[in-house]
Image (cartoon, rainbow, N blue to C red):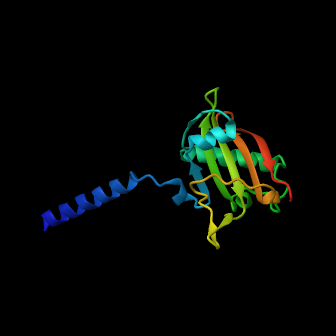
């Protein structure tokens, strides 16, 4: 009986320790955020060959705080509630790179719904979690900006115009 009890506690300890070491991918934390790791897209956005990086949990929190700062500074006037929660109801692609100064930059590309395209007469959702989306016009449903994680600042906010 003692041996069974000892084995039981060892098994429980082993399971609980292994559970703590699991790393949850970003798309399992927030299914509306996609991290795009693509040197081709970094080159397309910046016109330079910067190195990519992936944000950790604390850096994701810093991204949110900079977004909240932009909301408080009335940069997202199209939001009805003027809240981070409302902004995060949209889909966001994060393209992360390190600039010439060694600063970590996040290019955020945001849209209200996943765009579609027609292939062989069928409407298909674009693969927004792996491919950068580029939409012309569409109004405030589509916007992008850059966030400097190192300085906790934002720049180049661009909100699409109406067609």
Number of callouts: 0
Q: Which quadrant does the N terminus fall into?
A: bottom left
* Residue 14 in the figure: left or right of residue 47: left
49 or 34: which is nearer to us? Answer: 49
41 or 17: which is nearer to us? Answer: 41
Residue 87 in percent (x, y) is at 73, 58
**Is residue 21 positioned above or below 4 on the image?**
above
Residue 144 in percent (x, y) is at 74, 49
Asked which quadrant contains residue 30, the reply is bottom right
Q: Which quadrant does the C terminus fall into?
A: bottom right
Residue 9 in percent (x, y) is at 24, 61
* Residue 20 in the figure: left or right of residue 98: left
Asked which quadrant contains residue 126, the reply is bottom right
Q: Residue furthest front?
A: 120
**Is residue 118 positioned above or below 101 on the image?**
below
Residue at position x 31%, y 59% from top? Answer: 15
Residue at position x 83%, y 58% from top? Answer: 139
* Residue 39 in the figure: left or right of residue 65: left
Q: Residue furthest top?
A: 101
Residue at position x 72%, y 48% from top? Answer: 67
Residue 42 in percent (x, y) is at 62, 40
Asked which quadrant contains residue 54, the reply is top right
């Amino acid at each position: 009986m003692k041996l069974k009890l000892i084995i039981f506690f060892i098994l429980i300890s082993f399971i609980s320790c292994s559970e703590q070491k699991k790393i949850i991918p970003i798309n399992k934390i927030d299914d509306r955020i996609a991290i795009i790791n693509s040197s081709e897209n970094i080159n397309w956005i910046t016109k330079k060959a910067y190195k990519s990086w992936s944000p950790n949990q604390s850096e994701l929190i810093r991204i949110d705080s900079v977004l909240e700062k932009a909301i408080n500074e009335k940069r997202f006037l199209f939001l009805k509630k003027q809240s981070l929660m409302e902004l995060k109801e949209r889909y966001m692609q994060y393209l992360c790179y390190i600039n010439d100064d060694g600063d970590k930059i996040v290019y955020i590309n945001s849209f209200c719904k996943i765009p579609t395209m027609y292939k062989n007469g069928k409407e298909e959702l674009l693969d927004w979690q792996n491919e950068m989306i580029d939409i012309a016009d569409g109004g405030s449903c589509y916007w992008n900006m850059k966030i400097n994680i190192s300085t906790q600042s934002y720049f180049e906010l661009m909100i699409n115009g109406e067609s």
